[in-house]
């Protein structure tokens, strides 16, 4: 068995670096155009250059998303964009449209191409089609079961890579092609500008009774009828590996750096443990506990074990479950004194109970017993965004360790 790649989302340069520091093998990013996450910070060409260099120095990879469903005007500047991305050394570009595919082949024939989940590949013959055109990897549709993925793997050439989502948010149109936002808000989801109307609350109005709104009950739990749960497959690493998936993909380019680091760390530990222990592998519930400490909806396994039932929707609310906040990021640590220099991300106080998460180590808990500002003056609270404070740590920490605090 070949160990699958762990592929993380990176909405900006900080998230890219955190993903790699916490264990990702590769990241997927978007430039300022042509990607499906207009709400992400996304990368300028200078930031993309820095991110690619950061990755390659560590033996990691960067894939650039260009997976919109383009209209004529979108194609005008795309050839120059492809040329720039190729010259920066991106490891692959992610495409969903045949026209954009042909432009990449013409402008940058040496560029590796991955076919986006937006292309809705649900069978081995379509995978074979893209492979014969020159695609290196296919990101399979999310509507596939483990059995279907395994059959696809068995029917295609071994050098075709298969990538599958294993964690993160899912729109009601699982593979992403959706016109609801266009219709409801005149914002094109297929060009990166989704308004997320699948998360809205809906009522029923009878034609001759305008203004009389009746709740829409799919069942007695509520009315958010399009609101999908989040995907989570961390309990099923052996089954995913057995299917022959080449890359485990995490969703979340608009999520926080804390989300990216925590989710990557959990999956990294689970994958490594399985390949280290083999038949003696046992799932550690602490990995799932970690995933419950990031912003998320209730979890589901999607289509992997069969077609979803009504249990895959969250009917009562469209809000996320947020039980923890990141409150600080370690910038430096003095091993001689045990003092960490911390950049504030959310307000915290002397006396707060916090947990410290860092790459390659279990988290530990401690009380903030005291802290000082940059001038050495004692503080009772760190109220200002990105202010620098110093505090003693119960155990050694590394730069980019995160301090999190449970919500009361």
Image: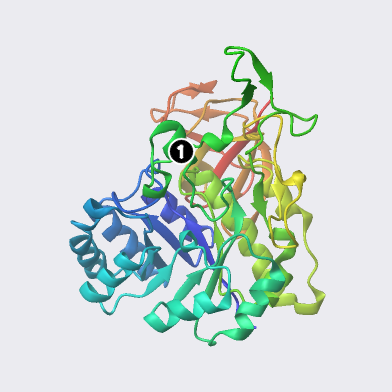
Is residue 34 among what the camera can see?
Answer: yes
User: On screen, 280 above or below 346?
Assistant: below
Task: Give the crowd class for mark 1: few <14, some 14-19, many >=20 residues within 10 Å.
Answer: some
- Find numbered disc 1 in the image and state the secondary structure of the residue it sits on: helix
Left or right of 312, for residue 185: left
Residue occupying image coordinates x 48% and y 52%: 177
Please, which residue is most extreme toward the front here?
A: 208
Give residue 14's position: percent from left, percent from top. 40, 49
Q: How many marks?
A: 1
Give residue 282's position: percent from left, percent from top. 80, 67
Left or right of 101, for residue 337: right
* Residue 155 picture quarter: bottom right
Q: How is the image coloured?
A: rainbow
Residue occupying image coordinates x 41% and y 47%: 37
For the C terminus, give its image quadrant.
top right
User: On screen, 351 above or below 251?
Assistant: above
Left or right of 341, for residue 95: left
Q: Which residue is mark 1?
A: 181
Left or right of 103, for residue 18: right
**Along the line of sight, the residue nearer the viewer: 367 or 243:** 243
Is residue 338 among what the camera can see?
Answer: no
Give residue 41's position: percent from left, percent from top. 36, 43
For the N terminus, give its image quadrant.
bottom right
**Along the line of sight, the residue nearer the viewer: 149 or 185:** 185
* Residue 273 picture quarter: bottom right
User: On screen, 339 above or below 261?
Assistant: above
Give residue 163's position: percent from left, percent from top. 54, 69
């Amino acid at each position: 068995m070949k160990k699958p790649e762990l592929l993380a989302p990176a909405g900006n340069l900080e998230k890219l670096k955190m993903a790699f520091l916490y264990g990702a093998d590769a990241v997927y990013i978007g430039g300022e155009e042509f990607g499906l996450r207009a709400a992400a910070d996304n990368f300028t060409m200078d930031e993309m250059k820095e991110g690619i260099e950061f990755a390659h120095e560590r033996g990691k990879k960067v894939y650039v998303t260009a997976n919109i469903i383009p209209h004529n005007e979108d194609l005008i500047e795309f050839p120059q964009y492809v040329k720039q991305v190729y010259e920066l050394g991106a490891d692959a570009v992610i495409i969903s449209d045949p026209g954009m595919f042909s432009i990449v082949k013409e402008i940058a024939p040496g560029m590796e191409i991955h076919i986006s989940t937006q292309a809705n590949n649900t069978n081995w013959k379509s995978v074979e089609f893209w492979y014969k055109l020159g695609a290196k990897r296919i990101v399979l549709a999310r509507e596939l079961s483990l059995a279907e993925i395994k059959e696809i793997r068995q029917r295609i050439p071994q050098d075709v890579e298969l990538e599958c989502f294993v964690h993160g948010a899912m729109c009601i149109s699982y593979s992403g092609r959706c016109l609801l936002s266009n219709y409801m808000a005149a914002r094109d989801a297929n060009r990166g500008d989704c308004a997320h109307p699948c998360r809205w609350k809906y009522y029923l109005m009878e034609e001759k009774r305008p203004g009389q709104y009746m709740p829409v009950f799919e069942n007695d739990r509520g009315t958010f009828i399009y609101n999908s749960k989040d995907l989570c497959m961390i309990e099923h690493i052996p089954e995913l590996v057995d299917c022959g998936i080449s890359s485990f993909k995490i969703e979340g380019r608009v999520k926080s750096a804390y989300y990216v680091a925590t989710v990557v760390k959990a999956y990294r530990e689970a994958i490594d443990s399985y390949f280290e222990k083999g038949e003696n592998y046992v799932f550690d519930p602490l990995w799932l506990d970690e995933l419950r400490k990031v912003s998320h909806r209730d979890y589901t396994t999607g289509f992997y074990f069969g077609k979803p039932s009504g249990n895959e929707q969250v009917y009562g609310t469209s809000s996320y479950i947020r039980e923890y906040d990141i409150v600080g990021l370690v910038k430096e640590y003095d091993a001689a004194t045990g003092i960490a220099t911390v950049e504030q991300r959310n307000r915290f106080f002397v006396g707060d109970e916090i947990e410290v998460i860092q790459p390659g180590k279990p988290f530990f808990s401690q009380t903030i017993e005291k802290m000082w500002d940059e001038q050495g003056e004692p503080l009772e609270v760190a109220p200002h965004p990105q202010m620098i404070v110093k505090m003693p740590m119960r155990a050694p920490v590394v730069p980019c360790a995160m301090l999190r605090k449970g919500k009361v």
